[in-house]
Image (cartoon, rainbow, N blue to C red):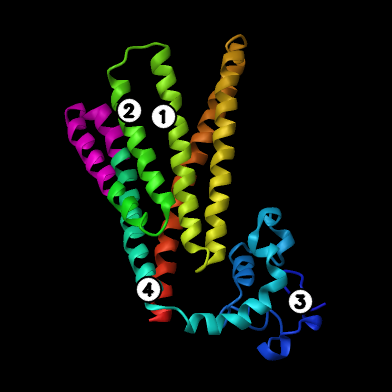
Amino acid sequence: MANTYCGKNCETCSSKEELNCSGCKTGRGNYMTGTCEIAACCRAEACNKCTECSMVADCKLFASSGQSSETRLSRTSEESAVSESDLKKAGFLAKWVNVIFISGIISMVSSFISTLTDFYAPHLSTYTTIADCILQIVILVALFALGKYEERFKHTAFLIIGVCILGIVSLFLGEGILLILITLIILILLLAYISCEANGYAAILRDIDIHLSAKWDNYVKLFFRAVIVLVITCVSAIVLIFFPPLLILWGVAIIGISIFLFALAIVRLVYLSQTVSRLKQFCRTHS
């Protein structure tokens, strides 16, 4: 068997001669002339073969490895058939995803500034709140614009509006069951919003970059796993009340999960940046 990333036998590949391919590690999958998404993925993840990756069980690229050579054979004719409307769509998507990317960076910086002002300059909190509201409006406009080509972005925008409305309502409620109920609904809407948005990016990339599309799919899974662990940790705090010495473990767990969620927020920005770059590259390649 030839030295391949996916484990496919080069010697029995019907497209080997037509592609003039000597194997993905020395042929068309190499860095300079590579067109194989599986090879690119293995290099990016520093894996010598697909089965070394921890996400191989859910990997759509690996599942399609049997058709990788046929996909490359048909790619040339498919790329030449890209229509003007496809280019216009990719350019439109790149512009508005870039707006969300920039807004995400500003939002992260704004959150940090808001935390500082709450402690050291509470009189400035009004201005940071106004800035956050303007930022949310910009994001909503971008999501509705993206909804022109992918309905999930419109759904995401409506979920954000729902979170904002319930957040305003909660400000006028005192402590009680109703406030707890509204808080739980807000958390559910936030989870749905994050999932819907990520699935939207995965959908618009599916025909452009299946590798990056798979990354967005895996992002949703990672986020939900983190939330499940967070819920379990919070519930366990009720039990640990009766064992005060163990409460320090609960605190450490909360800090660890918080750091992981922050890391996921950074990953989201990285994926947004890659999405914008890939859409722009698609436009440049086919224009």
Marks 3 and 4: which is nearer the front?
4
Q: Residue 36 at what x, y percent from top left?
A: 61, 75
* Residue 186 - label: 1
Q: Nearer the viewer, mark 1 or mark 4?
A: 4
Q: Tell me which label, 3 or 4, sits earlier in the chain.
A: 3
The reply, left or right, for residue 14 in relation to residue 214 is: right
Residue 30 in the image, given as x and y percentages of width and height: 61, 79
Residue 249, image x, y percentages: 59, 24
Q: Write down the region rendered in magenta.
A: 112-138
On residue 3, which mark appears?
3
Tell which tag, 2 or 4, sits nearer the viewer.
Answer: 4
Earlier in the chain: of badge 2 and badge 1, it is 2
Q: Compute the Cα span from label 1 to label 3.
A: 51 Å
Q: Is residue 15 left or right of residue 278?
A: right
Q: Residues within 10 Å of mark 4 (few under 14, many from 20)?
A: few
Question: Residue beneath label 2, please?
Answer: 167
SS type, badge 2 = helix
Q: Nearer the viewer, mark 2 or mark 3?
A: 2
Q: Amino acid at mark 4?
A: Ser
Q: Which of marks 4 and 1 precedes in the sequence? A: 4
Q: Are marks 2 and 1 in contact (CB under 8 Å)?
A: yes
Q: Is residue 250 shown above or below 51? A: above
Disc 2 + disc 3, Cβ < 8 Å: no
Asked whether 120 or 204 is in front, the reply is 204
* Amino acid tagged 1: Ile
Residue 85 disc label: 4
Residue type beneath disc 2: Gly
Q: Quadrant of residue 164?
A: top left
Residue 199 marker: none
Report helix, strand or loop for mark 1: helix
